[in-house]
Image: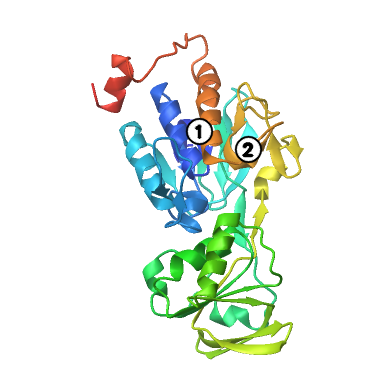
Amino acid sequence: MSDIKKTDVLIVGAGPVGLFAVFELGLLDMKCHLIDILDRPGGQCTELYPEKPIYDIPAWPTISAQGLVEKLMEQIAPFKPEFTFNRIVAGLEKLEDGTFRVTTDEGEVFDAKVVVIAAGGGSFQPKRPPIPGIEAFEGKSVFYSVRRMEDFRGHDIMIVGGGDSALDWTLNLQPIARSVTLVHRRPEFRAAPDSVNKMYALQETKELEFQIGQVTALTGSNGELRSATVKAPEGDIEIPVTRMLPFFGLTMKLGPIAEWGLNLHENLIKVDTEKFETSVPGIFAVGDINWYPGKLKLILSGFHEVALMAQAAKRIVSPGERVVFQYTTSSTNLQKKLGVA
């Protein structure tokens, strides 16, 4: 079949961990093709919080989520990875020669010697709050993520939720908004204590409002909000709103990956900690999608997992070839691959 695309490694997911996998695999001369359900690289970092600062990436005291993705794309450029976006990996079968045949929901076919699942939490979508008629405002004045902070400048913003995303965007948007009202059903939060303290400090100075309660109704026309009704302990309150950000979490689904016959642990893919290989030889899982004892869902943990995975993948892609461990700081061979020699 001439329309089958062949690659050494097929990576499912183009978030930060999937992107860094290209780097580690590329150092070992493996060609990568990435497939992602989104329309661009970056995963949740790009889709949900591109301007949110990240503080625990080594050597970067602070970097935005989008900034991290851009740096990773710059880092992997020498290896010329190929991407297929807006696709779900629908099927997988192992061929007689040991390679994997992967198909997408649009019918593309890929043959790969190794498959790496770096799909974060799987295919994800924000949870819609139970507010009557909210669908009419979605995409115009109700949003489930912040792509550009400037789009919210000068608006009366209502943020609904009690987790890190709700508190982070309350603090980040307050300086540019006309008004900010944070709504949560109770005074206790699931967010970082420092963020909660900062929010209460801004409430004390009347730079934002915090309202205990639940949003029960929206008013507006042609997709544009005018106000929201909040059922509060003191009774119903109508609050002017032109932009709403509900943060009720994400619905994560493995999707078709769940049908691949992999051993799962609470809807995550179980792996070993030597190679981060799944129960199917040749299929690896790295990042938030995997599980093992002591697992931490951190980007930097995914980076570590990728480095070990690449060593094992090389033995499958190039059987019999001796894998020589090298440092990028001292190996002229690796430096030539990176274009810095």
Look at 57% across and 64% down and name the residue there. 166
Look at 58% across and 58% down and name the residue there. 164
Nearest to the observer: residue 158 or residue 23: 158
Callout 2 crowding tier (Cα within 10 Å): few <14, some 14–19, many ≥20? some
Q: Quadrant of residue 74?
A: top left
Nearest to the observer: residue 282 or residue 189: 189
Q: Earlier in the sequence, mark 2 or mark 1?
A: 2
Look at 54% across and 73% down and name the residue there. 203
Placement of the C terminus among the 4 image quadrants: top left
In the depicted structure, whether residue 208 falls above or below residue 30: below
Q: Can I make out residue 288 in this image?
A: yes
Using residue 196 as the reference point, say whether residue 63 is left or right of it.
Answer: left
Q: Position of residue 133 (x, y in %)?
A: 64, 83
Q: Look at label 1 and name its amino acid.
A: Phe
Q: Position of residue 103 (x, y in %)?
A: 56, 43
In the depicted structure, whether residue 5 falls above or below residue 168: above
Callout 1 crowding tier (Cα within 10 Å): few <14, some 14–19, many ≥20? many
Q: Position of residue 2 (x, y in %)?
A: 44, 37
In the depicted structure, whether residue 239 falls above or below residue 1: below
Q: Quadrant of residue 80?
A: top left
Nearest to the observer: residue 157 or residue 9: 157
Element under label 2? loop
Q: Look at label 2 and name its amino acid.
A: Leu
Residue behind mark 1:
303
Element under label 1? helix
Q: Can I make out residue 113 in this image?
A: no
Using residue 100 as the reference point, say whether residue 56 is left or right of it.
Answer: left
Residue behind mark 2:
296
Label 2 and label 1: CA atoms lie apart by 12 Å
